[in-house]
Image (cartoon, rainbow, N blue to C red):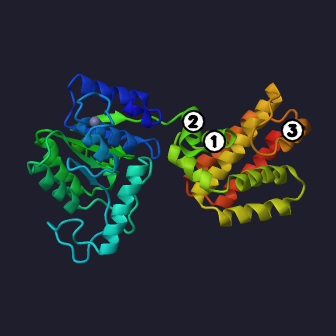
Amino acid sequence: MSWDRIIGQHRAKELLRSAVSGKRVAHAYLFVGPDGIGKDALALEFARVLTCSSGLPDACGGCPSCQRMETLRHPNLRLVFALPTGKSEKKGDHPIEVLTTDQVKQITEEIQKKAADPYYRIAVPKANFIKINSIRELKREASLTGAEQGTKVLLIFHAEEMNTEAMNSLLKTLEEPLPDTVLLLTTNDQDALLPTVVSRCQVVRCELLSEDEIAGALVGRDGIAPAEAGLVASVAHGSYSAARDLLSSDIQKQQTEAVEFIRLALGRSRFALMKEVERLAAEYDRPALERWLRFMESWLRDAIVLRERGIRPLMGDGASTQRFVERFPTADLPAAIGRVEASIAHLDKNLYLSLILSNLAIDLRKLITGA
Ligand SMILES: [Zn+2]
């Protein structure tokens, strides 16, 4: 089952498999959903299925076509993503030939990383948008009669990075589909695309992954210990990539700091608390602070599980959770968790980080001590 390479996304997989088995493959698909849940991975596997010589809804993995797809070097596959603009690049220039040797090397390396790991996010330095010349080249190549038989796949990663001109150029291809050619687009922001582009694609909605799916992938694919995988999955917000980013950050440090913050909020020294608030506000940006708050949330959840069901947390310092639960037996922990979530929501607004944190500390004290 070639689709097993993709984490979760059962609904999307079934939709794509049945399109192939029922010979109802559309001309264009748009994979929509947040970052890190596997839209690119789904699109790449679908490309493998469409080009596989077996014609089955699961790629055989053994034919020459499948083997070439492993390296993403397949004559019938075209990948489009944001690229740097070449020095004095003009409309109609080849999007890659205008770049320096170093840049071409970087691009090749990025494609190799993507081939090795479909969950890898391609990032070429100074590439901020998908160039009109990339779309033109895509159309030019697609219209050539390929040396290779079979379906051609044109795949655009992060389609929202096309500017209006590029989207309009793509629209013509969508209006007059080329024979034996399937266009696949992935995006985290459907609203950033022209409505006319969206309406010409079959939209494949991709779902947030469950904690079990993320934890299972971290253990199975990345060799992470189950306890650590479970903790990271619980704060990754349904995104496998976010979970992997968390692993590279210092989990233990963030968790210790989050617990220390609660301790200071409950303690007597307002000065020590404010000093810590200022330090956090200076050291962390908003995304980092969100992760940090999610660790606090997961620590409070562990405290509920310990209090209600007597189960000690797997990760971190179980003893501190035990002491906390004994000392504050009537703490309103569900409300405290709700309060942490409210702080996470405030991060999106343009509020001072120090204000968000000091208000959180005041409210946590009330909710935990009842005073
Ligand atoms: Zn095959």
Q: CA distance from mark 1 to mark 3?
A: 22 Å
Q: Indicate the amino acid at tag 2.
A: Gly
Tell me: 138 left or right of 260.
Answer: left
Disc 3 marks which residue?
322
Task: Point out which mark residue 311 bears.
Answer: none
Numbered disc total? 3
Mark 1 crowd level (few <14, some 14–19, many ≥20, 10 Å Cα): many
- Any part of residue 139 in sight: yes
Q: CA distance from mark 3 to mark 2?
A: 28 Å
- Residue contact at pointers 3 and 2, CB within 8 angstroms: no
- Residue contact at pointers 1 and 2, CB within 8 angstroms: yes
- Any part of residue 370 in sight: no
Q: Nearer the viewer, residue 253 or 268?
A: 253
Q: Indicate the amino acid at tag 1.
A: Ala
Disc 1 marks which residue?
229
Q: Residue at x 36, y 26 (%)?
A: 14
Q: Quadrant of ligand 1?
A: top left
Disc 2 marks which residue?
216
Of callouts 3 and 2, the N-terminal one? 2
Q: Quadrant of residue 300?
A: top right
| Quadrant of image for the N terminus | top left
Q: CA distance from mark 1 to mark 2?
A: 8 Å
Compared with 9, 318 (above or below) is: below
Q: Nearer the viewer, residue 138 or 325?
A: 138
Of callouts 1 and 3, the N-terminal one? 1
Give how far across and how far down residue 259 sits, in percent: 78, 49
Q: Residue at x 33, y 45 (%)?
A: 186
